[in-house]
Image: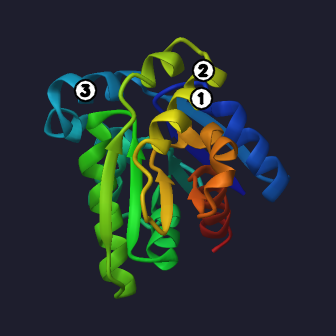
Amino acid sequence: MKITCLHTMDIHIPTFDVLFREIAPQAEVSHVIRGDLLARAQTEGIPGIRADTLAALSALDGDAVLCTCSTLGTMVDELADPRVLRVDRPMMEEAVRTGPKVLMAICLESTRGPSLSVLESATQGLGLPLDVTVHCCAGAWPFFENGDKTGFATAVAASVRTAVNDHNSVVLAQASMQGAAPLLADLGIPVLTSPLLAAQATVAQAKS
């Protein structure tokens, strides 16, 4: 079984290596880093990276390919290759199931459109209602860029707390945000992250 991951930051590699070892120790997992795509998305927007992202995804081989960057998710959907999965879809489907009022937290504005798109797609696919609030954790991303995982998680959690009201669940839209989930465990509602659910879906696809 061969699985290929497309990342925009190499900090994701250890996270997914651990998950795939636990779920499918027999899998051969490789990683491709395309930080340029995320950097360009923040300046050029999604249309500016569309062609290059589609080309990058199409060039990857394996029984399953996982794109771990939410910003690139729109192109995964456009590619419409069942082998290629976007990291956030399984999480968004779970969010829709938890109840209509969802607080979706992001750290980059370039993620807003792609994340909303997949959440709305999940709602339509499951035929369930949705009332989503998008909250941008302004100021958190520089911690991540500097490799400060603890500072990043703390900043995300603190920001999310300012936005939670009567929501049924919190979605930490970007895979990088998963470290904030334990810091929000006392909220009393599901705090959903994407890496584990995405890894499970990727292994299932690779086996199919």
Residue 46 location, quadrant: top left
- Asked if residue 86 shows in the view, the reply is no
Q: Residue at x 29, y 57 (%)?
A: 116
1 and 2 marks in contact (CB < 8 Å): yes
Q: Label 3's element?
A: helix
Pinpoint residue 7: horizontal percent, then vertical percent. 50, 34
Residue designated by label 3: 42
> What whole-number distance in Å separates the C-alpha atoms at marks 1 and 2?
5 Å
Q: Residues within 10 Å of mark 3 (few under 14, many from 20)?
A: some
- Pair 3/2: label in front: 2
Residue designated by label 2: 151
Pinpoint residue 88: horizontal percent, then vertical percent. 47, 55
Going from N to C along the chain, the mark reached first, 1 or 3, is: 3
Q: Label 2 is placed on what type of residue?
A: Gly
Residue designated by label 1: 154
Q: Label 1 is placed on what type of residue?
A: Thr
Give left or right: position of 20 versus 198: right
**Pick the front one: 174 or 187:** 187
Q: Label 2's element?
A: helix
Q: Label 3 is placed on what type of residue?
A: Gln
25 to 44, vertically: above or below = below
3 and 2 marks in contact (CB < 8 Å): no
Q: Residue at x 29, y 69 (%)?
A: 120
